[in-house]
Image (tube, rainbow, N blue to C red):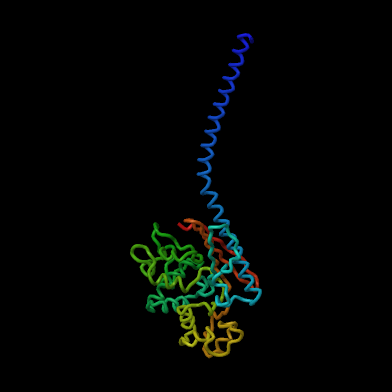
Amino acid sequence: MKPFYCRKRKGSVMLFILGVALFLTGVIAVIMDYSVIEMKLRAPAVKEHSIRQDAYNGLYAAIAEIKEYLEIDGALHSPLQGWGELLTDGRAMLPKGSKIEAKAVDETAKLPLSSLKEEELEALFYEMGFSETDCNYIAQKFLDWTDSDDSARIDGAEKEDYDDDEAMPPNRAVRTLAELKYVKDLYPYFFLENGEPNEMYEKLASAASLENTGESVNFNTANELVLRAIYKMDEINFDTNIFDAIQGKTGGVSDGEYWLSSAADISSRGANPPLRYVGVDAKFLRIEVSARRGVLTYRITALCEVDGSSLSVKKIYEGFVR
């Protein structure tokens, strides 16, 4: 029979081990609770990072697809070539449950707003529906907002014509059409009383580009307002045959190219072309990519410049669509 003190010592060891086990069980429980909470907090961030990566994968695939069209056709004339809706062949590999959409918009379809002279602005505003008096007034106010000098035109307005609590002319090209709110006296021409854009604002947005900094407009993608404005600039009667010429409904069409491949195609297809801004290919593209997973949508807009057979990204805007 073992001595009493041995049995007592063995019991103490067992109690110590049980105490340590209980302590460790409690620690493990706390750690697990913390881990669950941490995972719940991190999960949205991980998911958001993942969907952003999906969007960029889509952008890279879209750019690669457009470059293929450039290499094959030598130029981006019309979305009819196939580059309007992108990634329809499933080339962008995404995780299960994700969806991606991509399209290319031709900014060269619009007039280069930053390059328009006073009489050209007046022609555009006239075709939008403003009176001749208003056309001159709006053009002068707009140009004094953007030009580099501080000399006011007759109906214009420079810094000394603005109140102290008003935004001052930045003397640079506008970065957003929303700046028209702050140009002296132009608010009622382009905005409703509640601050929302009106019909004239929408017309201007459809006809003038902040991204097209070139010297041409792609007639293949230009809308009627843009074409009418260009004819007006040249003081030439608008030729409605231009639409049939652009679409290849008149004259000769080869290899199924129902678009203009050269400026000479306009005349050869029976239309009278204007003298300025005549172009037949895209020089500036806006590539829009949207990645969706569940209720989350992430959008990337890349502004690209086309130079020959090369495509370079100039700006990128990105973020979640709320």
Q: Position of residue 56 (x, y in %)?
A: 58, 59
Which residue does the image show at 54% across and 39% down from the upper left?
35
Q: Tell whether 279 sits left or right of 167.
A: right
Q: Residue furthest front?
A: 1
Percent position of residue 162, x then y: 40, 62
Residue nearer the viewer, 210 or 270: 270
Q: Quadrant of the N terminus?
A: top right
- Residue 182: image location, x then y, percent: 41, 63
Q: Residue at x 57, y 71 (%)?
A: 284
Count of all numbered marks drawn on residues in the image? 0
- Residue occupying image coordinates x 44% and y 64%: 178
Task: Find residue 230 and report its horizontal and vertical position in percent.
Answer: 49, 81
Quarter of the figure that contains the C terminus: bottom left
- Residue farthest toward the left in the current orientation of the protein: 193
Please state which of residues 269 and 80 is positioned toward the viewer in this rendering.
80
Q: Quadrant of residue 184?
A: bottom left
- The answer to whether residue 250 is left or right of residue 134 is right
Up-down relation of residue 200 to residue 58 (above or below): below
Which residue is drawn at the image coordinates 44% and 72% (left, top)? 204
